[in-house]
Image: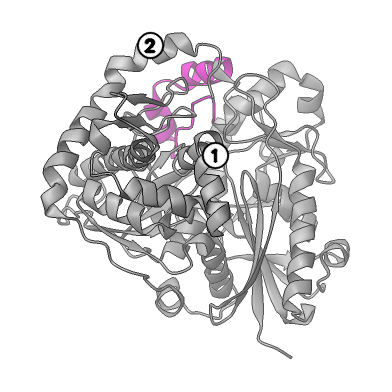
């Protein structure tokens, strides 16, 4: 018998990433499978849930074959997934229509109806619920199905998120975790139960929702059918797991109170660990459940983080891709070299990274990206650097607002106000030394990328599973054993004047262009 391990799956927007993690925290192997997002109409973003399971099965089999791990040594399986999708399922867990994923914003009419019904927002807070009222939130999506596909609405036995759909495949029953349930807008923050008053108010019943458990709860073992399809055994225990952001929180290692992390994936966020709940509707800063039961993440999300850099590579970086092919390196290495050849501030070129609308600190589905102050003396190096810096400016904006919430003392007015001094960095963007230094300089904070930054969710889910299986007594001991920091990046104080100037200009742009974006993109919100 070899070393025992946990099978984790990170089920994202663009694909599934399966990872085998040993009980000592070593990554044994990784397998990935991409899938597509469908955009059939403006504002729509859908995926066929069957492709989630097909990718789950394929990557598991590939991983077992590649690593030659004995299935008996896979003692647990768990997953994280993209959040805020609406999937109607029949009693057997089959999806009745494509998933309306987190990017989907078709339900503007329904979100307005929801706000009117539960206005003011304080009404939802008084009932212990996190207000979720935009067109990208779950209840407006469910109401869209009610209004436009009534037969599907009537046939629905359970509403679930991406992870909930897959859990039904694994154990044969319907479960969700607290972190996923909270973003439905129907879950009591403190009592950890569905709120009947709101459920009935939105025209649902509690039996239409999955049973909500802690992230660490063992919810069963693999069904014989799931075990056969995956190539595992029916003794493999299934741990409930978490949404992608709460899992990443654990994997970042920043789980102690007042510790913060920065996630740089397709989308991204800044998060600080807190002990109590708070929400600031004006800035979109709110506390959600951590993957650690009993802890919260004070979080501000950014819709497009690494995505604009990928857009540059795919749409404008043809020459850089050819150079990379000749040198047998990653195109991003070439693009980073070009960006590094340009001084801080990118010759006063400003990039607006709002390619898909934004959630915090501006909540606007019509806002879009762009370049300001573009001139003939700017080339691809300046454009590349401006993209990296533009994302960093927006992250600074989010971080500033999180600090404002902390400064109010609403979390615990009797305690000293915590200051965000450093952020553990993770996600694919954290592998770029240049970007890490840019973040340190723009934010004037220490940035600490973790080792294995691309596997942060897998490590988080593995630790959630290990605590659930009693391999570790608590999360602190698991993090101290498994999570390591790659390097510390400190801000260059000499660059503070230029970045303060550029940031202040950046922060003032949105109010000036807000109405322009609304006019240009009316009816085409994402």
Q: Which mark is residue 327?
A: none
Q: Residues within 10 Å of mark 2 (few under 14, many from 20)?
A: some
* 29 relative position to 470: left or right: right
Q: Quadrant of the C terminus?
A: top right
Which residue in the structure is indicated by mark 2? 516
Q: Nearer the viewer, residue 229 or 158?
A: 229
- Which of the two labelled residues, at mark 1 and mark 2, occupies the earlier sequence position? 1
Under circle 2, the secondary element is: helix
- Where residue 307 sits in the image (x, y, percent)? 50, 40
Q: Which mark is residue 318?
A: 1
Specify the farthest residue to the bottom: 1
Asked whether the residues under the numbered discs 1 and 2 touch, taking CB atoms below 8 Å apart as contact, a structural biologist would say: no
Q: Quadrant of residue 369?
A: top left
In the image, the segment drawn in magenta is: 109-136
Q: Residues within 10 Å of mark 1 (few under 14, many from 20)?
A: few
Q: Quadrant of residue 512?
A: top left
Closer to the camera: disc 1 or disc 2? 1
Q: CA distance from mark 1 to mark 2?
A: 31 Å
Q: Quadrant of the N terminus?
A: bottom right
Residue at the spot x=77%, y=81% of the render?
70
* 356 relative position to 446: left or right: right
Under circle 1, the secondary element is: helix
Q: Nearer the viewer, residue 100 or 436?
A: 436
Specify the farthest residue to the front: 326
Q: Nearer the viewer, residue 221 or 338?
A: 338
Q: Inspect this view and state whether residue 239 appears.
A: no
């Amino acid at each position: 018998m070899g070393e025992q391990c946990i099978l984790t799956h990170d089920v994202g927007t663009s694909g599934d990433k399966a990872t085998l993690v040993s009980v000592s925290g070593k990554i044994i192997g990784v397998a990935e499978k991409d899938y597509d997002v469908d955009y059939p109409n403006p504002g729509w973003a859908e995926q066929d849930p069957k492709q989630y399971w097909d990718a789950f099965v394929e990557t598991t089999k590939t991983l077992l074959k590649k690593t030659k791990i004995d299935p008996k040594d896979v003692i647990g399986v768990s997953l994280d997934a993209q959040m805020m999708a609406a999937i109607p399922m029949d009693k057997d867990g089959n999806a009745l229509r494509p998933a309306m994923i987190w990017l989907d914003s078709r339900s503007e009419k329904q979100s307005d109806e929801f706000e009117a019904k539960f206005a003011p927002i304080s009404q939802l807070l008084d009932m212990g619920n996190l207000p979720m009222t935009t067109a990208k939130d779950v209840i407006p999506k469910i109401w869209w199905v009610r209004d436009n596909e009534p037969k599907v609405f009537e046939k629905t036995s359970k509403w679930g998120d991406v992870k909930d759909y897959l859990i039904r495949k694994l154990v044969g029953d319907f479960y969700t975790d607290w972190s996923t349930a909270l973003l439905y807008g129907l879950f009591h923050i403190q009592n950890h139960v569905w709120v009947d008053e709101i459920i009935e108010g939105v025209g649902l019943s509690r039996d239409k929702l999955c049973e909500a458990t802690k992230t660490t709860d063992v919810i069963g073992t693999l069904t014989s059918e799931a075990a056969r399809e995956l190539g595992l055994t029916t003794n493999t225990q299934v741990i409930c797991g978490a949404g992608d952001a709460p899992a990443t929180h654990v994997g970042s290692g920043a789980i102690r109170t007042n510790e913060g992390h920065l996630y740089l994936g397709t989308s991204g966020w800044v998060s600080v660990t807190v002990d109590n709940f708070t929400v600031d509707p004006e800035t979109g800063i709110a506390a959600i459940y951590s993957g650690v039961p009993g802890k919260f993440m004070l979080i501000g999300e950014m819709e497009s983080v690494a995505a604009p850099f990928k857009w540059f590579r795919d749409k404008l970086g043809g020459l850089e891709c050819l150079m990379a092919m000749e040198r047998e390196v990653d195109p991003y290495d070439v693009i980073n070299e070009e960006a590094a050849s340009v001084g801080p501030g990118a010759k006063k070129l400003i990039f607006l990274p709002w390619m898909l609308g934004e959630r915090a600190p501006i909540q606007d589905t019509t806002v879009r990206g762009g370049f300001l102050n573009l001139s003939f003396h700017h080339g691809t190096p300046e454009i590349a650097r401006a993209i990296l810096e533009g994302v960093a400016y927006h992250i600074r904006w989010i971080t500033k607002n999180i600090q404002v919430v902390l400064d109010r003392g609403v979390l615990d007015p009797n305690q000293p106000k915590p200051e965000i001094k450093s952020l553990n960095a993770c996600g694919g963007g954290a592998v770029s030394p240049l970007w890490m230094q840019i973040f340190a300089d723009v934010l004037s904070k220490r940035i600490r990328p973790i080792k294995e930054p691309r596997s942060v969710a897998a490590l988080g889910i593995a630790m959630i599973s290990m605590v659930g299986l009693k391999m570790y007594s608590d999360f602190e001991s698991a993090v101290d054993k498994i999570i390591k920091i790659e390097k510390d990046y400190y801000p260059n104080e000499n660059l503070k004047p230029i970045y303060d100037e550029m940031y202040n200009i950046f922060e003032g742009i949105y109010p000036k262009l807000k109405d322009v974006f609304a006019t240009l993109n009316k009816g085409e919100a994402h």
